[in-house]
Image (cartoon, rainbow, N blue to C red):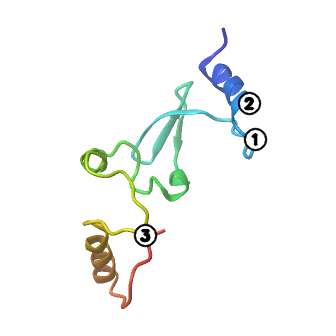
Amino acid sequence: MGTLFEKTAGRFKSYVMPTYAPQIMFVRGKDARLWDDEGNEYLDFAAGIAVCSLGHCNKRVADAVAEQSRKLVHISNLYMNELMPVLAEKLVTESGMDGKVFFC
C-alpha cells in the first residue's frame, strides 16, 4: 500500500513534469507554519513563493477569498474590476510614494 507520501510521490513521478524535485509533502498549514504527512512542523519562509505572504488558513483572509470567489475569481489586467483601483489607491497612499501601481 505505502504511505501517503509514497503514493503521492508515485503519482507525481507519473504525471507531473519534473521541473522540481520535491522531497517533502505538506498536508496543512496555519499562519507561518506547515506540517508534513508525518506531523513534522516547519516554518514557511518561502510563503508559497510570495502567494501566501499573509500566512496559511488565516480566517480573515480565507473569508475574504471565499466572499470574492462568489463574485469573480480572476480576470485579466486587460479589464477593470471594482477592487483593483481601491487597492492601488491604498498602496500608493500607505506607501507614501507618488505614482501608480502595476499588478502582476
Does residue 45 appear anywhere in the picture? no
Location of residue 102 in the rendering, given as x and y in whole percent from the top left corner? 44, 76
Earlier residue among tags 2 and 1: 2
**Residue 40 has which mark?**
none
What residue is drawn where x is 47% and y is 55%? Answer: 51
Residue type, mark 2 in image: Lys
Helix, strand or loop under label 3: loop
Earlier residue among tags 3 and 2: 2
Q: CA distance from mark 1 to mark 3?
A: 32 Å
Say which residue label 3 marks: 78
Residue type, mark 3 in image: Leu
Location of residue 73 in the rendering, given as x and y in whole percent from the top left corner? 36, 51
Q: Nearer the viewer, mark 1 or mark 3?
A: 3
Residue type, mark 1 in image: Pro
Q: Nearer the viewer, residue 47 or 41?
A: 47
Q: CA distance from mark 2 to mark 1?
A: 7 Å
Question: How many C-alpha atoms fall within 10 Å of the one at disc 3: few (<14), some, or many (≥20)?
Answer: few
**Residue 13 has which mark?**
2
What residue is drawn where x is 25% and y is 66%? Answer: 82
Location of residue 75 in the rendering, given as x and y in whole percent from the top left corner? 39, 59
Say which residue label 1 marks: 18
Q: Nearer the viewer, residue 101 or 95?
A: 101
